[in-house]
Image (spheres, coloured by chain):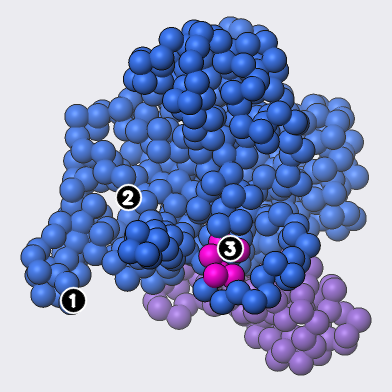
Amino acid sequence: MMQTDLPPRPGAPGAAVDTAVFERLLAAVGPAAQPELLRRLRDDFQSHGADLPLHPAKADLTQVRKLSHVAVALAGVVGAARLQMAATALHDAAEHGDLDKARQLCPAVQEQSTEIIAFLKQQLRARTGAA
Amino acid sequence: MPAPILAIEDTLSLQMIYQTVLGNAGHRVITAETAADGLKQFHKIKPCVVLLDLSLPDRDGLALMTDCLTERPDTCFIVITANGSINRAVQAMRAGAYEFLVKPFDEQRLLAAVKNAQSDIMRARALKSGEIKHPPIKEFIGSSPAMRDVYSKIRSVSQSMATVFISGESGTGKELCAQAVHDQSNRANGPFVPLNCGAIPQDLLESEVFGHLKGSFTGAITDKPGAAAVADGGTLFLDEICEMDLNLQTKLLRFIQTSTIRPVGSTTARKVNVRILCATNRDPIEEVRRGRFRQDLFYRLHVVPIHLPPLHERGDDVLELAEAALRRFSQEEGRNFTALSDDVKQIFLSHHWPGNVRQLLNVLRNVVVLNDGPLVTKSMLPMDMHHPTPPPATQTATAPAPAEATTGTLIGRTLAEIEEIVIEETIARHGGSVPRAAHVLDVSPSTIYRKRASWKKRERSS
C-alpha cells in the first residue's frame, strides 16, 4: 500500500466517515484482507443503501425494513454516524408501516450511501489502483 | 481441537469482518449466509459457539436458534441484532441465547463474548466430568452444580476490576455474592459499602450515593459523604439497581465513565477509586425494553453477569442449608435440635420456595423458637408446607395472573383500608418479598416501606 497515494482523510466534523473508526476496522482485519473488505463494503452499501427505492410503495416497506436494517450495521461498522442515524430512522418508519416517513427518509439514506461508496472507492483505489 | 465457531450472517462484508477478527484472535470460523445453510453447518460441525444475525433472508434467526437449541441445548448462541431492537434481544435471551451484541460491530465486545462463551462451556464440561471441583466460598453453603458454577465465576471475576451484575430472585443471596466477590478480590482490605436503591426514597438517593454539602437542601444540616466516597479504595454494591430513577441513572453513568463524584450542592468534582457491583431481582433487559433503565448504563454495568439460581433449582442444597441453619439456630436459641425427619426432608426437596433461602431460614427459625428437638417433624412446619405448592407460571418479572376480584370483601371499607389489604396480600403472595410486590403494584419498594411504617405507627398509637 502506498501511503502517499491515499486520498485526504475526511476527519472534520460532519464528514461522512469517522476516520478513527474506519482505520480501527481496517486494522482489525489486517492489511491482507483490507482490499477484499473494501470491495464487499462497497457492494453491500450499493445493494442495501444506494439501491433503496427513492419513492417506495406500501408493498416495498418490508424490503425497505430489511435493507435499512443492514444499512444501520454497515454504517456503524465504518463510522458513518449520520448515515447510521438516518438508516435507523428509516428502519423504524418501515417497521411501523409509516409510508410517508419512509418516503421522506429514503432519499437521504440513498444519498449518504452513495457518498460512502465514493469514499470506499477512493480507499480501494489508493490501496490497489482499482475501484 | 475445539469445534469451529459458526457465524450465520447474510451481509458479506459483516461476515468477512467477523471471520477475520475472530481468525486473527486464533479462532476457526465457518460462515453461512442463510438459515438453511446455517442449519446444515450446525449439524455438520457441531459448534459450541454460534454467532447469529437475527435477520436472515430465508427464515427468522430466532426460530433457527430455537430449533438448534432443542437439538443441542449446551450450544452458546451469541445473537447479533441492530441497535434499537431491544425487544428482539429480550426475546432472544428468553429463548436461550447466551449473549446478545448490538450492531454496529464492536471488536472488543465480540471477542469478549466469544471468549466468555468458550470458557463457560469448558468449565461446564469439566464440572460435569468431575475434573475440577469448586469448593463452596465461605459465605455460601451448597455444593450443587448450579452453585459450583457461581463459585467458579466469583473466583474468576473477583481479581478483576470488571463490574459485576448479579441477578436472581429475592432471597437467593445476592448481597452475599457481592460480599464474596469483594472478599476474594485484592480490595478485600478496603471498604465494602452496600446501598439498597429500593429502600431509600428517590429524592434522597442521589445524596446517599454521592453525598451532600451542608445546606444544599432542607434537612442537610451537615456535610455528608456518599456511599461512593466511603467506598473509595474498595467496593460499592448497589442493590436493587433497577429501582433507581432515570435522572440518577444518568449521573451514575457519568460516575462510572469518569470515576468522579460531585456531592449535591458542590461545584467541585473528586476522583474516587471504586469497584462497582450491582444486583437486581428484576429482569434488567425487560426494564431496558420498557424504558425504565438506560440501555447505555445497562451495557456499562452488565460486563460480568452472575445469576443466582432459585433454591428449588439447587437440588440437595436445600437440605445442606437447612441442616446448617438448624445447628446455628439451635445454638442461638438454646434448643437441642439435631436433624430433620425424613418426611420433612421430602417436603423441603419438593417445596417451591418462592422466598428462596430467606424463606427457608424464616421457617427454620420459627420451628426452633416454637418447638423442642431433637428432630424437626412435619407437624412443626407451617400448614401451607404440608401440601405440595404448584410452581408459579414464570419466575421473572412477569406478574402472576391476577386473582379473581373479591370486591365483596372490599366494599364498605375506606380507600386506605383497601390499599393496605391489597398491598399486604400482594406481599404475602410473593413470599414476603416487598421488592417483588412493589414491582407487581408498579410502585417503588420505598413507597411500600413508608406505608408499612406509617401503619405500624398508627397501630402503636391506637
What is the letter of the blue chain? B
* Secondary-structure class at tag 2: strand
* Secondary-structure class at tag 1: loop
Give yes or no for residue A103 being in the magenta stretch: no
What is the letter of the purple chain? A
Q: Magenta segment, which residues? A: B417-423
Residue at position x 61%, y 32% in the image = B382
* Secondary-structure class at tag 3: helix
Residue at position x 79%, y 68% in the image = A66
Disc 1 marks which residue?
Answer: B217
In front of the other: label 3 or label 2?
3
Check residue B195 in the rendering and tell me which mark sits there, or answer none. Answer: 2
Residue at position x 65%, y 16% in the image = B345
Q: CA distance from mark 3 to mark 1?
A: 36 Å
Disc 3 marks which residue?
Answer: B421
Q: Are marks 2 and 1 in contact (CB under 8 Å)?
A: no
Query: How far across and how far down the image is residue B219, in percent?
Result: 17, 72
Mark 2 crowdedness (10 Å alpha carbons): few <14, some 14-19, many ≥20: many
